[in-house]
Image (spheres, rainbow, N blue to C red):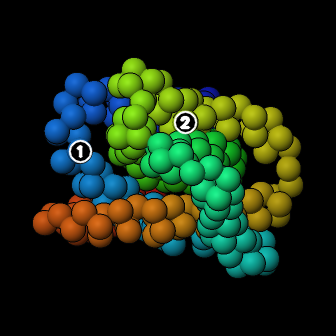
Amino acid sequence: MSTSVAVILASCLSCLVTTIGIFIIIKFENWGIKNAVYFMSFAAGVLISVSFLHIIPTSFRMTSSAPIYLLVGFMGLYTINRFINILFCNECNRENLSIGVIPMIGIGLHSLIDGIIYSITFNVSIFTGALAAIGMILHEFPEGIVTFVLLERSGFSRKKSAFYAFLAAGISTPLGTVISFPFIEKISFPLLGVLLAISAGALVYVGASHLLPAVEKENRKFSLFFLLVGILVAIFIVTSQK
């Protein structure tokens, strides 16, 4: 399988999983809300484990400056999210903006970055891209659900909530891939290592600063179990390829 085909398939699958999450929450709202935390737990385990076990060590082998850019990726994504919240929340007092639209913008930006991460990781190798894609695709399911629920709670109709959730959490990922891929495949090997380190920092941030706090807030009985399952799955995938 060529790199371009793998990247397109991964980003489209990500969009599909998000769409399925939105569809399920519309048709089976109680089930979706009840079990979303378990998908987040599993995705967090996979994302964090894959980053530390494979993506970060790979970036360290590709460039000696990887530690610096790992920090840049983590803090950069944090700063972007903080900037969006502060900028919009300070300029507008509408309740529906803070409840629904602000998270939608943040999720949309994050999903766009996901598409760029696909381009970066798959250009390192199909295996590296696949590892990153596993956790990222899994966390798209609850992401679509969360976006829809927040928009609906903020006063949007179910139809508009579904449409905006699809735009923010779904279609933005393939868009990020399409925009970035033509440029990513032309860069040098050391620079690709830099981008991989930034991507790893972003993945750790998503898992540790978004997914895990959401899981802890829910405080569900089996959430730790699904987190451990995600970690074990990541360990199995990585070690089976060595």
SS state under label 1:
helix
Q: Residues within 10 Å of mark 1 (few under 14, many from 20)?
A: some
Sequence-first disc among 2 and 1: 1
Q: Position of residue 90 (x, y in %)?
A: 65, 58
The residue drawn where x is 67% and y is 38% is: 176
Residue 197's disc is none
Q: CA distance from mark 2 to mark 1?
A: 19 Å
SS state under label 2:
helix
- The kind of residue tagged 1 is Ile
Q: Which residue occupies the foreground of this view, 117 or 130?
A: 117
Residue 33's disc is 1
Q: Which residue occupies the foreground of this view, 11 or 104?
A: 104
Q: Which residue occupies the foreground of this view, 18 or 57?
A: 18
Q: Which residue occupies the foreground of this view, 135 or 140?
A: 140
The residue drawn where x is 75% and y is 40% is: 180
Q: Is residue 187 left or right of residue 175?
A: right
| Residue identified by numbered label 2 | 168
Q: Position of residue 140 (x, y in %)?
A: 43, 43
Q: Position of residue 27 (x, y in %)?
A: 22, 25
Residue 198 seen from this side: yes
- The kind of residue tagged 2 is Ala
Q: Residues within 10 Å of mark 2 (few under 14, many from 20)?
A: many
Image height of 51 relative to 67, above or below = above
Q: Position of residue 31 (x, y in %)?
A: 17, 39
Residue 103 seen from this side: no
In the picture, residue 116 is in which quadrant?
top right
Q: Looking at the rendering, in which quadrant would you find the N terminus?
A: top right
Q: Looking at this rendering, what residue extends furthest in the front direction? A: 93
In the picture, residue 232 is in which quadrant?
bottom left
The residue drawn where x is 55% and y is 29% is: 167
Image height of 54 relative to 189, above or below = below
The residue drawn where x is 35% and y is 25% is: 158
